[in-house]
Amino acid sequence: MMPLDGIRVLEVAMYGFVPSAGAVLADWGADVIKIEHAVTGDPQRGLRQTGTMRVEGDPNPNVEHANRGKRSLGLDISRPEGKEVLYELARHADVFLTSFLPGHRDKFGIDVDDIRTVNPRIVYARGSAFGPRGPEAGKGGYDMTAFWARAGTAASITPEGTDGIINPPSPAYGDTISGTNLAGGIAAALLKRERTGEPSVVDVSLLGSGLWAMGHATALSLHLGKPWIPPPVGTHGSVTNPLSGLYETSDGHHLAFVMMQPGKFWADVCRHIDRPELADDPRFDTAEHLVANTAEAVKILREVLATRTLAEWSRSFATLAGPWAPVQDSLQVGDDPQIRANEYLLPAGELELVASPVQFDVQAPHLGPAPEFAAQTEEILLELGLDWDRIIALKAAGAVT
């Protein structure tokens, strides 16, 4: 049994951010009903080109990532008949999840008071670009604008002298992080309702999530009065620790050392790179000497590590005591045995998808595929108790797909 078995989520949302919260809740066992426009569906379904990658045909990972394990109902909530169905669904839901802006929530009759009128105990969760208060509460945005650019990551990751600004590392990067935050908030609100009987309104924004991701650097910046500035590309990570930084291997790949106590690990590293004599070198034989001679130690490590491939060093470093990791791309992670052992990548229909990061009782979630557009419309309406005459009438009126 998963923690959210028996919880029903009614999702009225589009694109990546808020639907990814629904995907996490589905991973945790919730029954997530995705409401899509009766004709056009979620615009995300039309997304084929992302960066340099283009997807032809189905399944489409651009849809599957944020919508796996849900059921889809095509519903036109601008029509009175469609709104009546939505309210009936809300009566039987535990969570109402939406990405709609305040003006559209009011226009379609799906704001907090509207939904609470039909279900006073429902947890109402909304994802926004800039938060529920302030002069921009009614503005829309995307992870590139609100999470990446405005919250500080883009400027903080772009080295001085770079021509332009570094883009997010992947599509829906800030969306997925923010969606996980929203799912966690919903889970906490469900626990509060269980204990007190009181439902909550849960708010998560891309801007707030971006700031949280940059929280350490932001705190330092505000305390010291200067922005976080990254080192130039290729600079060793630490000026006082040769075992905290990136090193290139002979095949053009890299590995990362993050050993915060270099004196503790130096001798072991020297043995693993077949240079045991360096452990007793007077330049490096104490933690203080290592700090003072970091530049020389880095130079030696760069020369040695550049003599073998990443695969060769990975085999050699399997018994290395200090923390290190290969620098892997988004394809190489599929061959990582540690990722496979923990089932962080799982089958979902015809695709493999990344599981949401929380596991319960050392068990990976079951990932179902994303639903085809409106695929469960009749099934969900029949569960509500509507008969076929009513369903046909709704279809004829254009209220459901």
Image (tube, helix red, strand yellow):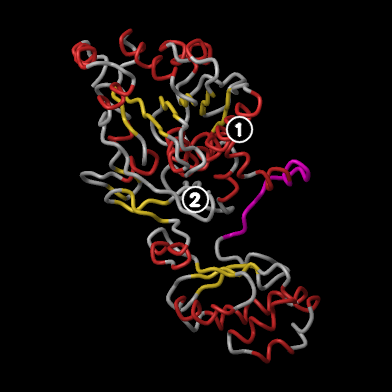
Neighbour tally class for label 2: few under 14, some 14-19, many 20 plus, Cα within 10 Å: few
In the figure, residue 340 lies in which quadrant?
A: bottom left
Task: Please name the residue that numbered disc 1 is placed on.
Answer: 191
Q: Are marks 2 and 1 in contact (CB under 8 Å)?
A: no
* The C terminus sits in image quarter: top left
Q: What stretch is highlighted in magenta?
A: 220-232
Position of residue 385 measured from the top left corner of the image (x, y, whole percent): 31, 18
Q: Is residue 39 visible?
A: yes
Q: Position of residue 305 (x, y in %)?
A: 54, 80
**Circle 2 — which element?**
loop
Indicate which label's residue lies in the foreground, 2 or 1.
Answer: 1
For residue 360, side relative to residue 227 (left or right)? left
- Residue 224: say if magenta: yes
**Viewer-proximal residue, 181 or 114?**
114
| Visible residue check, residue 148 | no
Q: Mark 2 points at which residue?
A: 163
Looking at the picture, does residue 157 appear above or below residue 74?
A: below
- Element class at badge 1: helix
**Residue 355, position as x, y percentages in the image:** 44, 50
Q: Front-most of 174 and 386?
A: 386
Q: Does 216 sit above or below residue 276?
A: above
